[in-house]
Amino acid sequence: MAKRPPSRKSRSRKSSPSFLRRLLIPVLLVVIVVGAVGVVLLDTFVRSKFEGAKWSLPAHVYSRSLEIFEGLPMRPEQLRWELDQLGYRSVARVAGPGQYSVNGQRMDLYTRPFRFWDADEAARAVTLTFSGGRVNSVIGSGRGELVRLEPVLIGGIYPEHSEDRVLVRLEDVPASLTEGLVAVEDRNFYLHMGVSPKAILRALVSNIKAGATVQGGSTITQQLVKNFYLNDDRNLLRKGVEAVMAVLLELHYSKQQILEAYLNEVYLGQAGKRAIHGFGMASQHLFRQPLRELELHQIALMIGMVKGASYYDPWRNPERAKARRNLVIDLMAEQGLVTQAAAQAAKQKHLDIASQPGTSSNPYPDYLQLVKDQLAKDYRQQDLQSAGLRIFTYLDPQVQHQVQQSVTSVLASLEKGYKLPANQLQAASLVARTGTAELLAVVGGRKAGFVGFNRAVDARRQVGSTIKPAVYLAALEQHDRYTLGTLIDDAPLSIKSGGKMWEPRNYERESHGLVPLYQALGHSYNQATARLGLDIGLNRVADTLRRLGYPDDVTEVPSLLLGAVDMSPYQVTEMYHTIAAEGFYSPLRTINAVYTADNEPLKRYPFATEQRFSPEVMHLLHYAMQVVMREGTGKTAYRKVPQSVTLAGKTGTTNDQRDSWFAGFADNYVGVVWIGRDDNGKMPLTGGTGALQVWSDTMAGLNVGSAPFMKPDGVEYYWVEPDNQSLSREGCSGARYLPYIKGSEPQARGSCFQQPGREVIDWFKDLFGSDKGG
Amino acid sequence: MKNYSTGFALAIGLLVLVGCAPMSPAPTTRSEPLPPISQPPPEPKVQPPAPPRRVPGAIQPDEVQEQSAQSPASSLLAQGWRQHSGGHYDAALGIAERAQRIDPRNPEVYLLMASAQLALYRNEVAEQLVRRGLSLSQSGTAVNRQLQALLGQITAGR
């Protein structure tokens, strides 16, 4: 019997398995090829990112470094404040860097090592003694040497993703940190190839038993891949890719390289908009200390936070954070990394974190704005946000703190005293170092740390009588016509200006007749100043303003003489710095130097100056500005500052008292204060009752010494009778000791000068009675 | 310290001696004619008086004080000059600025700054620094002479 051909049904039954078999191989081939291509692409991706610049590092901005030396004006509590800003710990007995102990007027201090822009400074142990508001001795530093503290980190310029980190090298990380991290997060780290099936199984068993996810099976390598390359998505495909990438990472790089990257990548907290990444930055954020200074309980806290930085946030969830920390300590003791005794001691300790995060995003926004404006001229935004630049500025945290305190407290006090609504008044203040033009402090508003309108730099307000020193300076430069004793008429005047009559009047509506020039400035007489300025010429006054440093156009109208010109407090500070520096102009500076992340120098901003006025003329102007403080509109400064301190300055009040100004100098500081209302409304304050109070509070808080007042060779002092411009003698009624540029002194001899016997008395005084230095 | 009583006694003594001295006879004849009395002789220029006693609150110039040889700025300046000698002018400038921060009125600071800037061929900057140093230095001092010499060097090079 012949075989029947197979039916279609039986034919199809027999062909399905062979079809699938035939299909399987090509499909497998495709999968293998696609997989291989995928792996190659992943491999390229893994290597290119790991070997390139791994992170966009923000630029970090530092304050000035405090240099401590014998004679430095500083009280112990001021130094303690600075040390607290730097995270130094007050201890009973100093044992290592970052510690200090205080015993009355004596302080033992162990400084930290720091890579400055000009040198690497090692840690040093010194003993300081204080006396009379100054550092009396510095023992342990060598005669005449300095002790330099590291600068305070005051802010940064962050990348768009707002991650902040300080890179650390593995060899600089305490061994207890790396060992503890491995023990807690991935105990088989040194044995696996990126993925640990044992860990996965263990985690699976634990989670099934608990009925929830209580343990992760990811290795440190996988965690690094997730954070560095991928995202938080939890799906099978992503986990698969993560596993492949972890193996690839392990194939190409050593365990040390992977661990170092992990130490710098891991997320460990939030500071406002800034994400804290890496243990280097976390150490500053949590403890205000560098990693190398941390103790076991602090290291354990950070390791514990790896599992969930927000969940274990020690400020928000202290109990939870402490429990987690102690669990980590137990694990470390279990694995023999620490002794039981050390573990027990560490578990007893408090969390020991800083009272507030040590890396507040921006505690000095007004100063930082100036720094950024300067940097934008020299660097691209991209470089500032990603290259990890180190920017060293002149900000003095002590001065900044004092200025802010003075602004806040005096404004509140003024509002209360004058029964004004709370927070109606606003203020701006700047302090620069005389002679160096370094900006030490910038306050752009009454609320500390507030990021908003920076009145110190961006407000433009009429300056009122603070312009008068420029008018008198222009006059004194014509020393053949004007001396400090020249009599000016303080009578009312009216002149036509711009189609209208300009009729300046004195503040108290009184006229004073003929007054000597120094008195007209000292008491801020508008009428006398207007006459003087018109006689000199508006163009000369405008030229003087420009030479003082005012950069904008000046409209040459008579009202300019009384300050009808808009300036920012910053511009006024620059002008008054020229005055304080005896006629030498220097642009105000915020940045000292910019260095790379590896401390290679990029740019310095060296000091430069230009002589624009003679020292002789400036000496006369300084005299008149001291008259302002001793006898005139500035004398209430001496309610806060000791009488023995020489101050010089000028008050300023605008029409309707919409602006209250004071600009002045003492010791090595030039300070400017403006008070006003943002809506330009009227106030019951003058320059003397308003801004001067903030200024003098600041100077008193800084414990300033006298403004220097050396007589130049081209100046001589004479006793004169101011009322009639004639020579007089010491002891004559009404005689005043005035400076004159040589050759400009009065020639006429007053009646007292010519009294019989006066010459003989003076001869005896000169021979036997005058003080000789001291 | 003023001591008027001793001086006054001395003066009285001198007057007594002068009073006891024999007086020379007045001339009886004139050998030369007297000048015509048409203009009074010019008054001698008034010399500046000695500085008065220092009174708190009075506005008077500071007394001249000598620069301390062992100030913290001095040790920095010594460091700065060593850098300058080694040709590291930028480093010298950085150190000079540290010294300036501590002692901004020390003319030695500006001498170092100006020398370093001059070595970097920044003559105009150097000149102004010299002028600043001169304004702070006393005539006749060593640093004043050095600054004057440096200024001469700069202006001669124009």
Image: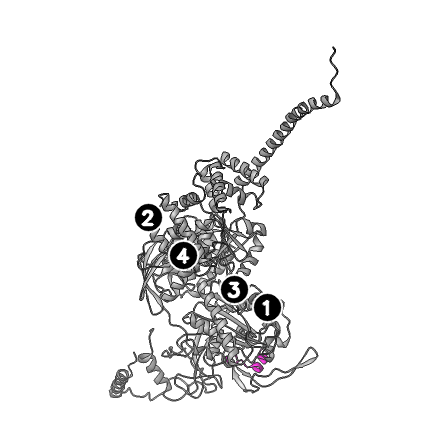
State the residue position of label 4. Answer: A351
Disc 4: CA contacts within 10 A as few (<14), some (14-19) or many (>=20): many
Q: Is residue B102 left or right of residue B10?
A: right
Reading the image, the residue beneath label 3 is A449
Q: Which one is nearer the viewer's eye here, B133 or A111?
A: A111
Q: Quadrant of residue B48?
A: bottom left
Where does the magenta region start and end?
A521-532
Which residue does the numbered mark 1 point to in the structure image? A459
Q: Say if labels 4 and 1 share a chain.
A: yes
Disc 2, disc 1: CB below 8 Å? no
Residue on which the image places disc 2: A340
Q: Is residue A43 above or below residue A558?
A: above
Q: Nearer the viewer, mark 2 or mark 3?
A: 2
- Magenta: main secondary structure equals helix
Q: Earlier in the sequence, mark 4 or mark 1?
A: 4
Q: Amino acid at mark 2?
A: Gln
